[in-house]
Every structure is written in structure tokens, then in C-alpha cells.
Image (cartoon, coloured by chain):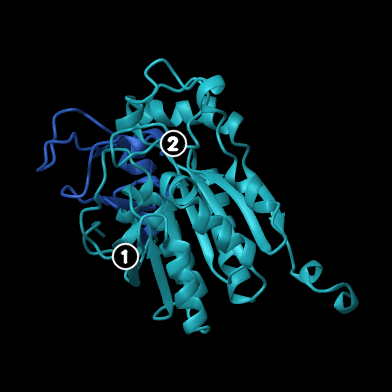
Amino acid sequence: MTRETQNKVKVTALDRILFMPVPGCPGCQHGTIGRIIAEVLEELELDGTAIEVIGIGCNSGVAMLNVDVVQGSHGGAPDTATAIKRLSPDSFVYTVQGDGDCIAIGAGSFIGALTRGELITIIMCNNANYGTTGGQLAPTTLSGQVTTTTPEGRNPAVSGHPVHVAELAATFKSVAYSARGALTSPAEYRRTKKYVKKAFQKQLDKIGLGYVEILSACPANWHLTPVDSIKWMEEHMIPEFPLGEFKDSDGKRNLPRDKQE
Amino acid sequence: MAKGEIVIIDVNCRGCGFCQLFCPKDCITITGDRFSPLGYLLPTFTNQDQCNACGICAWMCPHLAIDVYRYAGKGAAKS
């Protein structure tokens, strides 16, 4: 029997991805984040109800999924998602944002959504710089990292230390889930997918806001080859941004004391 | 004994090399003599007999340029 006549089963089928060339520089992992979201949406059978709100930035390329997409104003994706969720409570709403969109220009919107504990899911792509505009200093830039606006490396005495957003989100009482994953290996891919699925499940169970931060490579602005950028993530980014779950709440502690079990 | 095969979609590929880096069986190689329509170096499915259709290359490909197929039925054992 030749290969052509054999029965073949596609093991990586994704019905909800629109097959088109994915935008992005070689090695940019935002497409992988889009794939994780597509796989989780397929597994949770959220066809037809999911609404994606994307921020402004390279992460907008994740909008290749076959779901309804709204692009919020810069930094305002949590606000747009809040409006959609409150006006149609049965819909499933999640945002995909970059680090500049989420914690720099949209810090107010983001913290506001965390404070109110909206029933949305926020997925943040952390690539340690402003990818779209050419690699400037972002809040998540590592100490000593060279960017176009810090040519001698980020100096903590002048521009501070990187913001740990997953730990920050875990401190909010109304946040149900906060985790940080990376895309440095197939094992981390699987773990990150589990985090995204759990965060989506918190919204489906109406427990609270889910937040997942995903460390992704930006080889073009780090001035590394794609393969070297994976090594750079393992050596520099993961020691600074530890991976794992920081909060996994079942929602009972958020109730008033007399209603707790 | 190949358990499956991969198909590389040339127009989507940007030649980043993640498939070569992450393939556990070293089935994918960037040989340097094939180019995509956009001018990026294309990987080649070289060590075809070792492929076990795990799907890792498709997961890690940021540009969704790889489809993985597993052989089904009795033919899988004979191929």
C-alpha cells in the first residue's frame, strides 16, 4: 500500500482557524498563542458564542481565529469586553492583549477590570518590549535588556524593575485565576494550554476573572535568531518571570462571610 | 516504520526553524536549498521513517505552516 492511498487522519485539525498566512516576523510566537486559544475553544465547544476583543499591537495577528472579533481602543480592550459581557451575559468574551497594551497604556482599564472582577478572560502576550513600534522599553522589559530607548540596557535606578503582572493580578480578591505560561518547549506549550483552559472555565462557571500571561519570543526586536531567542527566554525571562499558577480560586472566599460554607 | 507524515505549507512558512528545533525524532531539517515564495528558507521532511505523528511541529510552528497526518487502519503497520 502506498502512502497516497492510505487512510490519513489529520491529528492537528483546527476547524476554527482561518487558513491564511499568519502575519508576523519569523519566529514571532503570537501565532502559537492563537493556536492555543483555537484548540481550547474547540475543546470547550464555544463555537458561535465566543467573542474576542483584541488590543492594539502585534497580538492583533491572533485574530486569525474564526470567531467574532472586536478591536478595542489602545489599552481599552478590557473596557470593551466589559461592555459586551454586561450587555449579553450569555456570551463568552476574552481579550488578547500585549504587554504594552495591557499594563502600560491600558493599565487603568486592566486594573479596573480586575477590581470589578468582570466575568471575562484576559490573555496577555509578554514579549518584554513594544514589538509593533520597533522594540522600545515596555513595563515588562528585563533589567539590563537593550531596547531602542535603553541602548545601554534598562537601568533599574532610572526606569525601574519589570512589572510582574500575573503576581499583581493574583492579589485582587475578585480575580479567580492567574497564571503565567511560556512557549519555550512542547511541555510548556501543553502546560500553557491547560492554564488557558482553566481560565476559560472560570468564566463559564461564573466564578470570576481569569488572567493568563504567556511569555512569547520576539526575535526581530531582540536581534536574535528564532532558535537563540528560545534560549534567551529560558536563560533570562523565565528566572525573572517564574511560571505557574498564582491563584486558582473556587469563588467561595469572595462571598460575604455569612454565606461562606 | 512511519506512523504518519507532515505536510509543509510553503506559502505560510517563515523559516524560523522551530520545527527543526523541537522535533523529538529529528525528522525535519532546514537544508538550505529550498526557499518559500517570500524568500525564507524552507524545512524539508527528511527522516520520514521515524515520524510518529506526535504533532509537536504543528503546535510549535508559529505560522501554522505544518499539517500532521497519522496513518489509519491496517496500512499503518505495513508502511
**For the residue marked with disc 1, what is the amino acid?**
Ile
Which class describes the residues within 10 Å of circle 1: few (<14), some (14-19), or many (20+)?
A: some
**Residue B64 position within the rendered picture, expressed as x and y whole percent measured from the top left:** 30, 52
Name the residue carrying label 2.
Answer: A138
SS under mark 1: loop
**Residue A51 position within the rendered picture, expressed as x and y whole percent measured from the top left:** 41, 73
Which residue sits furthest top? A152
- Would you place residue A181 above or below residue A94 in this image? above
Along the polypeptide, which appears first: circle 1 or circle 2?
1
Chain A's colour is cyan
The residue at the point 47 percent across, 51 percent down is: A102
Q: Foreground residue, A9 or B36?
A: B36
- Would you place residue A121 above or below residue B16 in this image? below
Left or right side of A94 for A117 = right
The residue at the point 43 percent across, 48 percent down is: A105
How many marks can you see?
A: 2
- Would you place residue A182 above or below residue A4 in this image? above
